[in-house]
Each structure stands twice: as structure tokens, then as C-alpha cells.
Image: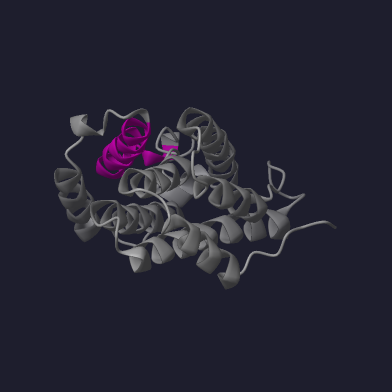
Amino acid sequence: MGKRVVGVGDIEEAVERAMRLEEDGRVKVGALLLVRYCGFHQDHRFSPWFESERVVLARVTQAGAELLRGSGAATNLSELRIAIREVLEENDPDGPPFGAEVSDHLVFADEVLDFIGSPDDLDLLSCAFERAEELAEGHEETGRDDWPMGDWEPVEFARLEAEARDLDVQGGLDYSAALLRSEEFSRLYANFIAGYYRDDDAGVAPDL
């Protein structure tokens, strides 16, 4: 009840509004996406099988925050994109369930960085928004399907993402507040992933 239906039209409208932003504003829109979806790298299931993926996702999240704080010069985005693609080449998306989750987010990060590297290419922004929407809707649906058997409550990720997207493309945005908002989303998102996967989903042997 009262749930907002997220659709392609919403993304098209957000892209149109992003066209009115300065280049730096569009870059920050991409950076907010990185912060929202790549911050689950502290999950213990990364060890021991996904350490390279953990390192890359941590670097991606840091790069997003640095871009929002105006210190993006400290991050070499070209090197970061190379690192992502190297890890993706070694990653098996058909492997353990947690590995597939990690792979999805590496692909997402790669696509968002494509846009950040070419902030005038609004087709890339549209693709990044669509990928974020898919992640949000997929995790919300999973939570609803498995609740109350799981150890988590479903979160309205699709609604939260739509609201964040609408705010992100506003002119004159307070990026400090936007970063805090995206970090809160990231915590909810990471908590869901932590609650959903079992250790053996990542090849981690249970404690005896």
C-alpha cells in the first residue's frame, strides 16, 4: 500500500534532468550509485575465496566517496576500471551463489565507471540507472519471497532507489547530505546481503 511503482519512464525523466547538470554534477550522480551498491565488501563471506573482489569493491566505494567529497583526484579511475575487469575475468558468475552476487556488482561498478569516464554519454547513465533499479528490485523481491523464513526483514529498496535517483539529479544538490543518504542505503543493502547468504553459499566451511 502506497508503494511507488518504478518504471522506465522514471529513469528517462531522471536522465533528462541529469542533462541540465554540469559535468561534475553528472559525475557525482554516478558516484552516488557506487556508494549505494558496492559497500558490502566487509561481509566475511568474501574470505577466503573472493579477496580480490573484496579489495576492488572497497576501492570502488572509496572512489565514489572521494568523488563526492571533491577529492577524486586521489583515485585513478582508469586503473580502477582495469582492476575490475581483471577480477571479472577470473570471476565465475556461475559459481557459488555469493560469487554470482559479487560478479553482478562488479559488472555494475564497471558500467557506472564507464559513465563517470564519459559523463556526457547519457545512454551510459540510463544503463547505470537501469542496472541499479534491477539490483534494488531484485533484492527487495528476494526479501519478500523469503520472509519470514530468513533472518532479515524485507526492505523497500526499489522505492528508496527511486527516491534517491530523483534527488540525485536535482540541481544545487547538497552532496554531503546525498552521500550520507547513500551510505545509509548501503548499510541496509549490506545488511540484507549478510542476512540472506549462508557461509556455504560462498564456500566457507561452517564453524565446528
Does residue 208 appear in this view? no
* Quadrant of the frame with the N terminus: bottom right
* Coloring basis for residues: one colour
Does residue 64 appear in this view? yes
Q: Main secondary structure of the magenta part?
A: helix
Foreground pick, 97 / 156? 156
> On the picture, is 120 further left or further right than 85?
right
The magenta stretch spans residue 51: yes
In this view, the residue farthest toward the bottom is 8
In this picture, is 183 found above or below 97? above
Q: Position of residue 61 (x, y in %)?
A: 36, 37
The magenta stretch spans residue 115: no
Q: Residue at x 51, y 35 (%)?
A: 178
Foreground pick, 205 / 10? 10
Number of labels in the image equals: 0
Q: Position of residue 11 (x, y in %)?
A: 53, 65
Foreground pick, 163 / 61? 163
> On the picture, is 89 further left or further right than 9?
left
Q: Residue at x 32, y 35 (%)?
A: 67
Q: Residue at x 43, y 38 (%)?
A: 39
Q: Position of residue 114 (x, y in %)?
A: 27, 57
Magenta stretch: give its range. Answer: 45-68
> On the picture, is 156 further left or further right than 20?
right
Q: Position of residue 80 (x, y in %)?
A: 20, 44
In this picture, is 43 found above or below 171? above
